[in-house]
Image: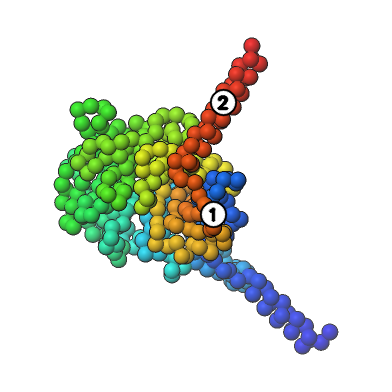
Amino acid sequence: MTRTGSAVKLLGLALVILVGGCASGGPKKYEAVFYPEPPELPRIQFLTSFTEASDVQPGKSWFELFITGEKEARLRPDKPYGTAVHQGRIFVCDTNSTVVFFDLGKKTYGTLEGAVGLGKLRQPLNISIDRDGNKYVADPVRSDIAVYDRNDAFVRSLNAPERWKPVDVAVFEDGVYVVDMKNALVHVFDRRNGAYLRKFGQSETAEGSLRLPANIAFDKDGYLYLSDTGRFQIVKMDRDGNIRGTFGQLGTSTGYFARPRGVAVDRAGRVYAVDAAFDNVQIFTAEKRMLMYFGKAGVKPGDLFLPASVTIDYDNVDYFRKFADPKFEIEHLIFVTSQFGERLVNVYGFGKEKGKTYPTEAELLERLMERMKIEKEKQEKEDGTASGEKK
């Protein structure tokens, strides 16, 4: 073989390695996972997940790393909790560090620039973003709400007039509503200037009071929904602090709670409630009736590992259509964080199978109750058999 021929072959091999080793980046596409499972008609599909920088931005190719001898760092949140989605950016509170984001449009991963100096975060737990792009981060170690503007610059801190533990925050119109777990209260601030306005959450009766509130969300009509880990319920309140209803109670069956965490409400009034003990998200109708649930403990796509928060988004559906089954039409997105595992920010699509006639919510509830009855009878039978064997 001539030297020229050898050189050509080596060049060809190098090109093959270069092309084959290019890093594409971007979220992974999985085989379709639906909820409820077949043969029921699907309402939710697991679409993809975000865990590290390479899930959104191209990294260095294998060939580049081979030539330079470098090792590519795995940039990722260490222990995620709250999320918010705004203008194509998925913000994630890393409770062991700062707020990070995945930018879908620019295909970049970064940290909140203003979270330095006076704006440095110590344990960011939850984040909310208002209509102007201002960001509000609940940090119980800082013992305040850190506020950043639309350009991510630190603006101010919101502080209550008493010792408190701010664990979540939500914005409605010109009010900033903060969950205080220490005092079982909701504190209200003026969105425009940060002035303290009022507080509520305690009444003369235990039934009318919060006990250990953790997370908060608003519906389109301005009602608050709080996950209360002391009551083992989702509590619906008006903005004057009056309880207007509750969801669930302590238990291990469908519709019950053990460790309620994140809560969200979609435009139809459906309430989504995370339970860290069950590793799932339960969905209730606006009338407080259990509708369905999705997620479970495990390591497969769609499974959850100590889930923390749930966020509803309507603005980025087009970006995620490519991950959906061609027959499944997405209406809105559901983001659920797992605090551990290989899929930290899980993205689901809520929708319907094209060309199918779906049962009404009343019919779905009837089917759910029938399934629950069968499961209960099965469990009672198994418990009875086990008891008989012990005797």
Indicate the quadrant containing the N terminus: top left, top right, bottom left or bottom right.
Answer: bottom right
Residue at the top extreme of this rendering: 391
Q: Please tell me whether residue 19 is drawn above or below residue 377 in the rendered image.
A: below
Please name the residue shown 52% across and 52% down the image.
357
Say the numbered circle drawn on residue 356. Answer: 1
Please name the residue shown 48% across and 31% down the image.
253
The reply to whether callout 2 and callout 1 are in contact (CB within 8 Å) is no
User: In the depicted view, which residue is nearer to us: 287 or 45?
Assistant: 287
For mark 2, give the secondary structure. Answer: helix
Closer to the observer: label 2 or label 1? 1
Give the total of numbered labels.
2
Residue type at the position of mark 2: Glu
Residue 244 image position (x, y, % from top left): 27, 37
Using the rendered view, name the quadrant where residue 110 is placed.
bottom left
Residue type at the position of mark 1: Lys
Confirm whether residue 158 shows in the render.
yes
Q: Please tell me whether residue 110 is drawn above or below residue 189 in the rendered image.
A: below
Say the numbered circle drawn on residue 368. Answer: none
Indicate the quadrant containing the C terminus: top left, top right, bottom left or bottom right.
Answer: top right
Please name the residue shown 58% across and 68% down the image.
23
* Colouring mode (rainbow / by chain / secondary structure / one colour): rainbow
Crowding at dot 1, Cα within 10 Å, few <14 / some 14-19 / many 20+, comes out as few
Residue 373 image position (x, y, % from top left): 53, 29
Residue 193 image position (x, y, % from top left): 17, 56
Q: Counting residues from the N terminus, which is met first, the one under dot 2 or under dot 1? A: 1
Say the numbered circle drawn on residue 377. Answer: 2
Q: In this view, does 189 lie to the left or right of 119?
A: left
Confirm whether residue 108 shows in the render.
no
Q: Report the Cα–Cα distance between label 2 and label 1.
A: 32 Å
